[in-house]
Amino acid sequence: MDPTFPIAYWQVALTLVAALLSYIIVKGLHSRQLFYKLRRQGLPMPSWNIVTGNLLAFLPLLKHFPSNAHQNYLITELSKKFKKWDSCFYLDLWPFSIPFLVISSPSLAIQATQELDLPKPFDLDRFFRPFAGGTDTLFTLNGTEWKRSHAIFNPGFSASFILSQTHNIVRETADLVEIFKDHATKGDIFLLDDLLGYFMMDIIGAVILGSRLHSKKQFNQLGHAMRSQVRWQIADGELNLFKRWNPARPLVQWYNSRQMDSYVSKELEKRFAERQKSSDSPPRSVMDLVLDNYMKENPSAKTSSRMDPSFEKWASVHIRTFLFSGHDSTASTIEYCYHLLSKHPEAMTRIQAELDEVFGADPSTVGPQLLDQPQKINMLPYTTAVIKETMRLFPAASGVRKGLPGSILQDSNGNRFPTEGVTILIMHSAIHINPDYWKEPKSFIPERWLVGPEHPFYPAKGAWRPFEFGARNCIGQTLVMQDAKTVLAMTVREFDVCGAYDEWDELHPRKGLKTAWGERAYHVFRAAAHPADGFPCRVTKRK
């Protein structure tokens, strides 16, 4: 062995450490200079100093929340202090996060997403990379590249195509019904978050890939790797250094990414060969639509032995992105629908009455009826209202945009907020309970989605933002709503799904607070926002 090897190794290591420290120092100085200028202009921000930025503003709030509560609670609490600014403030959390302009006002959010149509920030790439396996996803692209990708995928998320996927959604939900029956028979406590995560992977796998994963019942390489990636993801502003610098994370994420790439590549090759033989047959998945577009733009591909490697990589990154975004937040939403319905029997009674009226009294006939008449899923206004109200109270994510030179937001009082150098964080959890825009903001009132503009409960313009607005709104929102409505239609009259947190806490005692804003199923970060402790629950058959 070369005796100089250890010396060379440590030289490389020291160089990397020095480079990292230089990066932190340079970025830190830039952030502090930016906020120093903003503060001198008298713009809103929590207590700030040049050493710690706004980090100390969090300290008084930490004692009011569980240690693992989602950071959105802290930011939402801070937003309450800036009402005179129409609910926005600057936030400097370096080195734990990038500079933010936090918005909890619909009017400012509308300016950022629709009037100015600001681009998506590059920082989103860091979040999506473990799930997508690369950069330049539909969620992070801008300009002409985004327009081209959006045009290719948009037909696969149209209302008509999603309705054509009813058989996939019903088939997977029928399996979920059988799993619920099994748990009801056993009377056990289980984690709903895990079950619905794999269940939604099966639905999105069928819609995107055109193949069944069966991951909710057995091991599946793609489903297991994606769900593992979700568990290992950390928040951009994670303050726990042991979590932030866990040396196992990059290794696990690399392995999971390889597993997903391998699986998706095989599916792409298999479907490519099928579409070459039968390109005139109706597409049965989003991937079929993309492959048809590829062969239309590249006629020689119809006789080629394999796809162009650059296209295959591009397609894989986007497919993995849709697999992640299409399953994770939807699973969380369905969990909270069960949770809120179990706490509000009057809403449960009304949703059951609607389902009786549309599908008849026998819950077991819902699936067959939807297979025969898929449009019936759009005849459920109260069920839709329950889902929308759930998304309001428990939003799975927030919106982000990139500030630009010369792009200035202005509130109703004429105050102007420059966006250059900051990422605009549209805080859904704050907007959705802002009493300036919602009557009884923390109450579960599905009826607010069924009243007219003259009613005091009618939602204010732009105040409900789970799918965001503007050209960059969520491409998959039709699929999300159809998934959630189908699951509720096929389960809520047959089963009661209730949280079992009291029993769980007895079995898993821990010190410290266990509720946030009085809610035991509070949000924790797990890629999207999910219920604490995986939502331990029991399922019982309804009488």
Image (cartoon, rainbow, N blue to C red):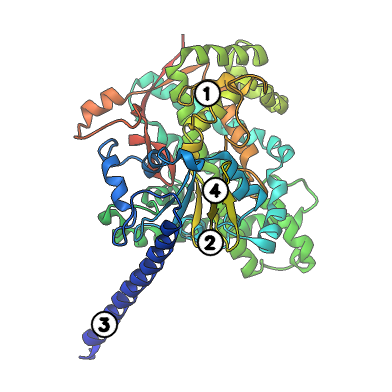
Q: Which residue is mark 3?
A: 9
Marked residue nearer the N-terminal end (4 or 3):
3
Can residue 372 be seen by looking at this rendering?
A: yes
Answer whether labels 1 and 4 touch (C-beta < 8 Å).
no
Q: Is residue 63 above or below residue 317?
A: above
Callout 3, which amino acid?
Answer: Tyr
Marked residue nearer the N-terminal end (2 or 1):
2
How many numbered circles are shown? 4
Residue 536 point in image, percent of width and height: 34, 29
Mark 1, secondary structure of its residue: loop
Q: Which residue is mark 2?
A: 420
Left or right position of 509 against 165: left
In this view, the residue in front, 1 or 303, is: 1
Q: Which residue is mark 1?
A: 439
Q: Nearer the viewer's eye, disc 3 or disc 2? A: 2
Q: Which residue is mark 4?
A: 415
Mark 4, secondary structure of its residue: loop
In this view, the residue in front, 382 or 251, is: 382
Residue 199 point in image, percent of width and height: 49, 37
Label 1 and label 3: CA atoms lie apart by 63 Å
Mark 2, secondary structure of its residue: loop
Quarter of the picture containing the N terminus is: bottom left
Q: Is residue 38 above or below residue 74?
A: below
Q: Residue placed at 51% from the left, 52% from the top?
A: 424
Mark 3, secondary structure of its residue: helix
Callout 1, which amino acid?
Answer: Lys
Label 2 and label 1: CA atoms lie apart by 34 Å
Q: Residue placed at 56% from the left, 33% from the top?
A: 172
